[in-house]
Amino acid sequence: MNANDLKWITSGNLEHNPFYFSIPEKLEKFGYCIDMSGYGEGKADKAQLCILDTANKKEEPNILIICPLGSKESWYLCLLKGIGLEFKFVNPAHDAVTFFSPETSNLMLLDESVLAEGEGSAFAPIRNSGILWDLVIIDAAGSPDGIIPTLYTDNFGMKTEKLLLFAPYPSEYTSAPEGLRDIVKSLLSDDAKSKTVDDYNIDETVMQFTMGSPFVNYPKEETEGGSLTVVNYSFPESDIPQNLHIEEQAGSRYSHGGNIFEEYNLPERSIYQKPNFTRSDAETLKNKDKKLEKFLDIIDGIMNSDDKTAIVYFKSEATVDYIEKVLSSIYYEKTSSIFYLEKTRFDVRQLKQWYETENARRIRVVLAGDKLSENIGIFTPITHIINYELPDSPVELQQRYMRRGFSPKQGRPEFIVFLDDNGLFDSRVLGRALAGNLYKAFRMNVPSDNILFAVPGIEVMLAEMIADIKYVADYTGAVGSSFDIISRFRQDYNIPAARNITTAARTHEYSQRKLETLAKALGVSDLIKDKEIDKSAMLTAITKKVEQIRSGYSYFDKDMAIKTIPHNTARNDEFKQFAGYLDGNPFNLGLNNAKKELKEAVNGKNDFVYIKDAVNAIPDAMKPAVLYNIWIYWHKNLGIGGSYAEFIKAYNEGVI
C-alpha cells in the first residue's frame, strides 16, 4: 500500500471544488490569500484543504487558527470530524497553554479575544517563544464586529510562512476593508511577498477568477440550485383582535414575528406558558397556531427520516423554548434527535465522544440562534434550513443560507421562509424590517449575493416599503404631533430604542435619510421627489433592479448605489482552464488512488488487511487523520466495521 497516496484519504470528507483548490496554490505563490467570499462560503473545507496541504508537506507542522469568541467549539468539531485532526484550545484561562514547545508540532485554536489581553494573556508564552508558524488562518468572515487590525499588527507578535484570511463581512459594507493589508504585512514572514499586497485592488475585480491575484471570491454554485420555499399561513381574523394584542414594556410590537402567543393574549396562552407540554397540549396549541401547524408538517417528514437534518433558526429565546417543548412532547421517543444548540454546553469530552461513536446519536433537528458558526460539521449534511423567525438584517438572512454544510452529492438544502397572509407577523418583518435594512445587504466594491432577492414578490415588498417610508417622512415633516405614526414606524421597522426618534422632527430626519439611502440603492431617487409617488413607475423600476441583482453579483459603489456584474465573471476562461487541470491535483489524484487501494485491501474472511506499514510511513501529526478517514471510507462507503473507537481498538491489537 502506497503511503504517499494513503495520506490523501484525509481529503475524502471535503468538497473538491476548483475555487477551493486555488487557495493552497495562491498560498504557495504569494504566501497569503484573502478570501473575500461574502459570508465565509465553504470556509471550513477551504481551511481544511490548506491545513492538509501544510501538514502533508511538514514533518512537524505548526498551524494556528484564530476565530471570534463563540466559534472555537465549531472549529474544533469541524476539524475533528472533518479531517480527524485535534486542535488545542487557547482561551483566556491562565493555564490554557501547557506543554508547549516551538520545536514540536503545534495545532492550535485561538480565541481572538485573547489577543486583546496583551502581555499578561495565556497566549504570552507562545508569542514570546519566537515560533514561526507554517500556517495561520484568521476567521473574520461574518463577524458582526468585523476585524480589529491592531489586534494583529500590535498584539500578535509572531510571523507565519503562510496566511489565509477570511475577510470580514458585513461590518464594512460602507467602506472597502483596507485594514486587511496591514494584517498581511505584519504577519507574513517574507517581506518581499508582503509588500505585494499593495499591488492589488480590493474592488469588483476580485470577482474575476485569476491565479495572478492573492484574492478569491467564491460565488454560489448556480448549477446545484438550492431552492427557496415560501410557506404561507393565515390566522382567522377572530384570532387576532386588537384588544388582545400584548404591548411590550418599551411600547413596541414583538419584533421577530411568527409567534402569535408572544403578540396576542389568546386563551391558549395559559398552556403556552407551561414549563412542559403534554401531547394534548401540543395538539391544542397547533390547532390555534397556524404557523406551528405548517412547521410541524415539514418537521414530521424530517423527524421520521434517516437521511434528513434541519437547522431551525430563531431570534427570541421564548420562541425557541416554545418549539423545543412542542417537539419534545410530540416526538418524545426521539428527543435525542432534537438538539437545542444554545442550551447545550460543548466540552471537549463530549465532542470526542460524538467523534468516536458517531452513530450513537442521530441529529435530525438543530434549534439555533444566529451565533451558530458556519462550521457545523457534526450536523452535516443539512437538508433543510428553516427560518422560524426572521432576522431584521439581510446579512443574517444570507449567513443562515450559507451555513449549509451541504454534501455535493445531495445538493443544497431547502431554504424555507414563512409568510403570513395577515401581514402582521413574518410578512411584516420581511417587508419592513428586513427590506428597510437593504443598505446592509451588500459590501462596498466587493460583489456578493443575497438570498433576500430570491424571495418571490420581493420587488412588490420593496416598492410598498419605499412608499410607506415616504409617507412617514412626509407626515412627520408636516405634522407637529404624530405619536401613532412614530410608534408604528418604530415597531414595523424594528428600530432600536437607542435610536432616538421620540419626536416628529427626529422621526422625520431619520425616515427621510433612510428613504434617500434606500432609493439611491435601488436607483429610484427621482421617483420619490414628487409629493405623490407614481406607484406603477416605482414598481416597474424596482422590478428591473431586482432582475439585475438576481442576474449576477452585486455591490455598493462609492455613492451607495447597487451595481451588478454578471454571474459568468467568476467562471471565466482562466477558471475553466484551471479547473481542467484538477484531475492531476495531488488531492484528487491521491484520494482516488487511496480509495482504490483501500477497496482492494478489503479481502479475506475478516474483510481487512494490515495497513500499519503504510500508516507508519506517514508523519506522526497526520497519522490520526489518516486512520480516521480510512475508517470513514470503510465504514460509510463500504459498510464495514463499527464505531471509530472499535476501529482503533482493532488497529492497536493488530487484528484488522
Image (tube, helix red, strand yellow):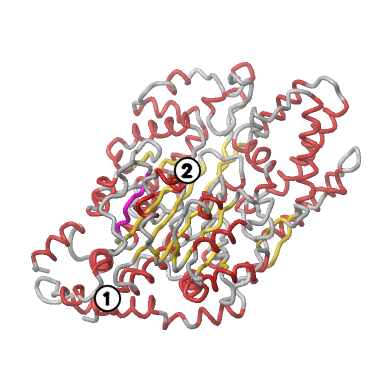
- Measured along the vertical axis of the image, is residue 600 above or below residue 32? below
Q: Which mark is residue 6?
A: 1
Q: Quadrant of residue 650?
A: bottom left
Q: Quadrant of residue 377?
A: bottom left
| Picture quarter with the N terminus | bottom left
Residue found at the far right of this picture: 530
Is residue 298 in sight in this rendering? no
- Measured along the vertical axis of the image, is residue 606 above or below residue 63? below
Please state the horizontal and vertical placement of residue 493, each as a whole percent of the image: 67, 34
Please state the horizontal and vertical placement of residue 235, each as a whole percent of the image: 58, 30
User: In front here: 330 or 529?
Assistant: 529
What is the span of residues highlighted in magenta in the rendered image?
86-91
Secondary structure under the numbered disc 1 in the rendered image: helix
Residue with the mark numbered 2: 371
Label whose residue precedes the other's in the sequence (2 or 1): 1
Q: Quadrant of residue 9?
A: bottom left
Instruction: Give the alpha-carbon distance from disc 2 to disc 1, as whole Å.
Output: 37 Å
Give the residue drawn at x 78%, y 41%: 515
